[in-house]
Image (cartoon, rainbow, N blue to C red):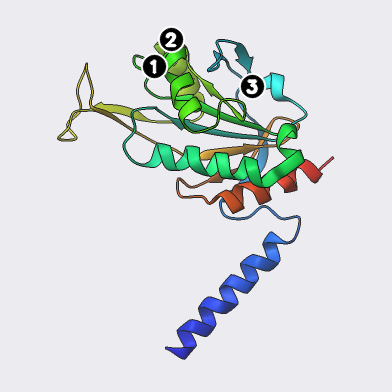
């Protein structure tokens, strides 16, 4: 029991040491710096947004939807908390969410979701026509599947959308640097964005 506690403590200290450094932590590091696929969609205020328009700012990019019963609200919360942790640096990063449920997530709906979570002025929640979004999902390897309450795939009127929900960390030059898992913490996200901010 003591040995396990010691191992856990040593692991925590090692993570803490990395977190205090200029290293990215808490996710899968990209093997090489590949450019993040560009896209153009519409945000919660009805404004056109393009990924390349955020060049010069680190970007945290995730895929969620407003009627999600579980992980999406948690991702949104952690983005909100990370934004708050960044303090004055928050305006120098871009937090971006893209819907995986375009039929229900129109501009008005993503605005309501953003307002309810205090995120309206902190992130860009993007939506658009299904065909346009499907191209973005494919480019980022995001698989989606509408399902009914029993979890069975359906062609229309889904109760939920099963989907991959990694968070891509993109550097100031527009390269994917890391994938964070769905259960990332606000601390981890804030740390990694600070690391990317310090890079030239």
Vertical order, 173 against 169 (above or below): above
Q: Which mark is residue 102?
A: 1
Q: Earlier in the sequence, mark 3 or mark 2?
A: 3
Q: Earlier in the sequence, mark 3 or mark 1?
A: 3
Residue beneath label 2, please? 129
For the residues labelled 3 and 2, the Cα–Cα distance comes to 17 Å
Q: Quadrant of residue 95?
A: top right
Q: Decide if residue 56 is on the left or right side of residue 45.
A: right
Q: Residue at coordinates 19% horizontally, 23% vertically from top-left?
A: 154
Q: Earlier in the sequence, mark 2 or mark 1?
A: 1
Q: Residue at coordinates 68% horizontally, 60% vertically from top-left?
A: 19
**Quarter of the C terminus within the rendering:** top right
Vertical order, 83 against 138 (above or below): below
- Residue 182 at x, y percent in the picture: 45, 45
| Residue lying at the far right of the rendered structure | 200
Q: Quadrant of residue 39?
A: top right
Residue beneath label 3, please? 51
């Amino acid at each position: 029991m003591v040995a396990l506690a010691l191992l856990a403590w040593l692991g925590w200290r090692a993570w803490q040491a990395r977190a205090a450094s200029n290293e990215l932590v808490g996710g899968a590091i990209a093997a090489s710096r590949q450019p993040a696929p560009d896209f153009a969609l519409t945000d919660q205020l009805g404004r056109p947004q393009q990924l390349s328009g955020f060049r010069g700012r680190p970007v945290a990019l995730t895929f969620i939807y407003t009627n999600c019963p579980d992980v999406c609200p948690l991702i949104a919360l952690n983005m909100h908390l990370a934004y708050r942790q960044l303090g004055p640096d928050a305006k120098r990063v871009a937090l971006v969410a893209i819907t995986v449920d375009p039929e229900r997530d129109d501009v008005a709906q993503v605005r309501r979701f953003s307002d309810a979570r205090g995120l309206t002025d902190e992130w860009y929640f993007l939506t658009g026509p299904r065909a346009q979004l499907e191209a973005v999902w494919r480019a980022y390897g995001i698989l989606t599947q509408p399902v009914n309450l029993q979890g069975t795939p359906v062609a229309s009127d889904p109760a939920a959308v099963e989907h991959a929900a990694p968070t891509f960390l993109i550097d100031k030059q527009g390269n994917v640097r890391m994938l964070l898992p769905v259960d990332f913490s606000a601390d981890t996200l804030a740390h990694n964005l600070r690391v990317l901010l310090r890079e030239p």
